Each structure stands twice: as structure tokens, then as C-alpha cells.
Image: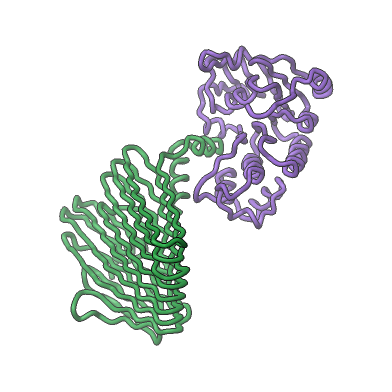
Chain colours: A green, B purple
Amino acid sequence: MNNQDKELLKEINDSFNEESESYNIRKNGKSIARKVNDYINIVTKEDKSGIDVYVKENTLFGIVHIPVIITESGLTDVVYNDFHIGKNANVIIFAGCGIHNDEHKDSEHDGIHRFYLESGAKVKYVEKHYGEGKGSGKKVLNPTTEIYMKDHSSMTMDSVQIKGVDDTVRITKAELEDNTTLEISEKIRTTGNETAKTEFNVNLNGENASVHVTSRSVAEGSSYQEFISNITGNTKCYAHVECDAIIKENGKVKAIPEIYAKNIDANLIHEAAIGKIAGEQLKKLMTLGLNESEAEEVIIKGFLK
Amino acid sequence: MLELKNISFKRDNKIILNNINLTLDDDKFYCITGPNGSGKSTLAKIIMGLIIPDSGSIIYNGIDITNLTVDERAKLGLGFAFQNPVTFKGLTVYDLLKIATGSEVGKKEACDILSKVGLCAKEYIDRELNNSLSGGELKRIEIASVIARCPSVSIFDEPEAGIDLWSFKYLTEIFKEIGLKKNGTTIVISHQERILSIADAIILLEAGQIKEAGNKDTMLNNILASDCLKGGTHE
């Protein structure tokens, strides 16, 4: 890895270093470094591009890093990564993709990640997307996440895309069985002519399954964002979806909520709020000595923190 | 010294403030009081730059600040506590106090500031400034954000509005302490006798004009005798 690679890696995952207990680094469509241990195994797929990550049952505090970096302009990298999390295993997975593109050709990464959580498994999944480079070529990231949760398992997913990604279509699907909990937090900031579309499809199939989706986004310049959520409650279950967006300049945000209760005991809530920064918030921070643009930045950074 | 010269302000063809002239000395505690609609909050906001007057000027320590923005006035040493504190998604109490002090203030120092307004610092310092905080809690944090700046002119717009009796008890204690310190000019917009009684001087506004101004003892007797504060709430 050269210095540019290291800088990109740092942008998407600053907790990674070569001492980390298990990892797989992918650069320009190929694995360039891998480390496994007794509890976490990483195997290259034979039928397509990608890896299988196996976390043994009852693993405690396992950590896996699977960062992707793309520095080759014009490359479209499609990868299928599957995560098999054993019974009662507890693991943190750091993913994410950084693209550096100084040329005129588009660079794209489509990561299809599937999570299979056995009974009682606990996963924290952290994903950060980032783009940089002076070229006119677009930086495109299209992550698809599929989550299959067996009874008493839980997962939190934190995804962040703050800077430099021209176009993104993010799709998250989840199937939840009895007594499962899924918490998703998504933060997106778009500027210029960037577009971001994010879609959640969650089926609450088991009793006492619950999902909480929090989406906070900021659309600036002439950027466009679309938020679609589709939550179906098939049994006694709970869902809470919050979509909060700040728009600036000519930024546009469309939120399309859909909640579908198919059982009398399904309790589904959707909240969505889109608007510009409140004038009172700006005024308050200005009385503390910040000018208008500094105040805006503080409000946005806090909102996306 | 803060001087207001011939300040007038109209809105929707209604005169809100009519030729206000006022000189406020350093290290004094002033209460501006008066019935609803008398123009008290408007006057406070004009001093901070949150409202621009139609005419008149504001001179602070010899500098004409009439055309300065809110943040420019803040940098000169003016501070303002809002009647209705603003909430922020994602910003914590600690974030606000860091911005207020304008430096990388440590958590211990921030906790000390919160303790001054009667909040148990450990419980509040990392709380988000959202609606999970009660009106009284937000009010005290608002006051803490002004105290944290140590401004030379501190303006509090109806600090007692919207808070419960317990919080009010703390509030009067806070203002007593501010009054004793004599640290810069303090201007409090208030209807409350207990806050008026802390002041050095009281300014009574009525229908956009200064009806009377003078030292606390004389003014308080006159005001209480005239019942002009009855029914006072927000403005």
C-alpha cells in the first residue's frame, strides 16, 4: 500500500491498522492483504468475486475490517461478501469504500453484503463511504445490504457517506425472526450535483421483532436525495423510522415512507421532517460569536454527528 | 457604557418603540419591565442586533454598533439569553458551552458552569439539546451559555417565562449572584418582583416609551402601587 492508499483507508476506517486481529483489504478489485484468527476466518469465493467471513459461535468481542479502496479510474468493481455469524457470537465489522479518481472515467464500487445471524448473535456493522480526486470521472458507490436474523439476534448498522460520492443507490433489506432487534443509523451529505438514493425494505416476521431506522441527511448545492422505507409488520412487532433532512441552496429531498401492518399487534411508526436550518438556531449561535456560515456548519456537523 | 439614542421601531404600521433614549452604565444590574406589548423584548433584541431599528443609534463604549451584525456584537462582548431557548438535533450541552466559551473548554470547567445554574453537571453535560429536556432545564442551559461567555453586557429576555416554581427559585438565586458580582452590565427583561428587587435600577416601558426610570427602591414602590405588572406574561 502506498501513502495515498493509507490516507484513503484512514478516511473510511481510522480504527484500522496492521495489528488489527482480522481483516481483508481489497484494492482495485483484488484482495491485497488478509489476516484471520482462530475465531474469524475469511475465505475467497470461488464462483464470483468476494469473500465469506465466518465468525465462530460464542466468539466474544470479535473485530473484522474489510475495507475497499479504488484508485484506478474507469474501474467497476462488483463484490459479494457474505458474513456467517455463529450462535451467540459478538462481533464488530468495519466496512466501507474509499475512491480516489483523478481521471475522467467513472469509478464504481458495488458491494453486495449479506449477513446471516444465527440465534443470539450480536453484530455491529460500521460502513463509511468516501470519494476524492480532481478528475471529472464520477465516484459511484452502490451498496446493497441484506440481513437475515434468527431468533434473539441483534444488529446495529451505522452507515456514513459525508463527502465526495457523486452517485449512490443504497439498498438495505432485512428479514427478522422472533425477538430480534435491528437498529440502523444512516448519515448522508450531498453537495454539488451529487445524487443519493437510499431504500430500506424490512420484514418483521417473528414475534417481538423490532427495527429502528434513523436517517439524517443534508442536501446542499443542486444535489438530490431520495429516502424510501418500506416496513412490513407480519406479527406482533415494533418499528420506528425517523427521516430528518436539512436542505440548503437548491438541494432537494424526497421521502417516501411506507409502513404496512398485517397484524393487529404490529406497531409501526414513521416520522419524516425536511426543511432548511431554522433561523432561530442560526441566531442563537450568532449570539455566541459565530458568523452565519460558521453557525450553519456547526448545525450541520452536529446533525450528522 | 451602552447608549441608545432615539431608537424607534414600527411593525405592521404599529409603533413598537417610540424614540427610546437610554444610557446604561457598566457594572450595573438593570431590569426592564412593563406591561405586555410595551416593547421590552423588542428593545432587548435591538440591543443584540436580532432586530434592526427603523431609526436611532446604539453606541457601545464609544463605538457605533447600530449596523453591526449579531456575531460582531457578540465578539465585542454582548450576550443574549433567549426567552424561548432553541433546540438542536445532534448538539450536546457540552458542544454549546464549548462554542459559548470560544475555546476548547474542558469538561470539568463546563460542568462548573452548569453547576452555577443549578444543574447536576454529570447528568446534563452529554445530553443532546433536544426536546427530551424540560422547559426549565433548557432555560437554565440557555442562561449557562451566556454566563460561559462572561459578556460585558448580558441581556436576559424574560428568564422566568415558561419555567416551574422550583426552577424559578434557582433562577432568582442565579441573578442574585450575577447582581452581586458587578461584572459588566446586566439587563434583564422581567415581570417578576423577585427579580426586579435584585436590580440596581428599573426601567418601566409603556406603549413603546420609557415611562419612568430610576433606582430600584423608588421604582419598585411606584410600580407595585400602580399594579402595572399585573397579568404580565410573554411578549
On-image quarter of the C terminus of chain B: top right
Q: Is residue A177 visible?
A: yes
On screen, residue B7 versus residue A126, left or right, reads: right
**Residue A201 location (% of width, % of height):** 33, 61
**Picture residue at 20% right of the left edge, 66% below the top:** A77
Q: Nearer the viewer, residue A142 or B70?
A: A142
**Residue A64 location (% of width, % of height):** 38, 75
Residue A144 versus residue B189 in the image, above or below:
below
Residue A51 versus residue B199 in the image, above or below:
below
**Residue A239 location (% of width, % of height):** 44, 60
Report the residue that reaches farthest toward the front. A264
**Residue A76 location (% of width, % of height):** 18, 63
Q: Is residue B155 visible?
A: no
On-image quarter of the N terminus of chain B: top right
On screen, residue B114 versus residue A262, left or right, reads: right
Choose top left, top right, bottom left or bottom right for residue B155.
top right
Report the residue that reaches farthest toward the bottom. A38
Q: Nearer the viewer, residue A84 or A76?
A: A84
On screen, residue A130 versus residue A29, left or right, reads: right
Q: Nearer the viewer, residue B75 or A232?
A: A232
**Picture residue at 28% right of the left edge, 63% below the top:** A143
Q: Nearer the viewer, residue A69 or A144?
A: A144
**Picture residue at 50% right of the left edge, 51% below the top:** B90
Residue A175 versus residue B154 in the image, above or below:
below
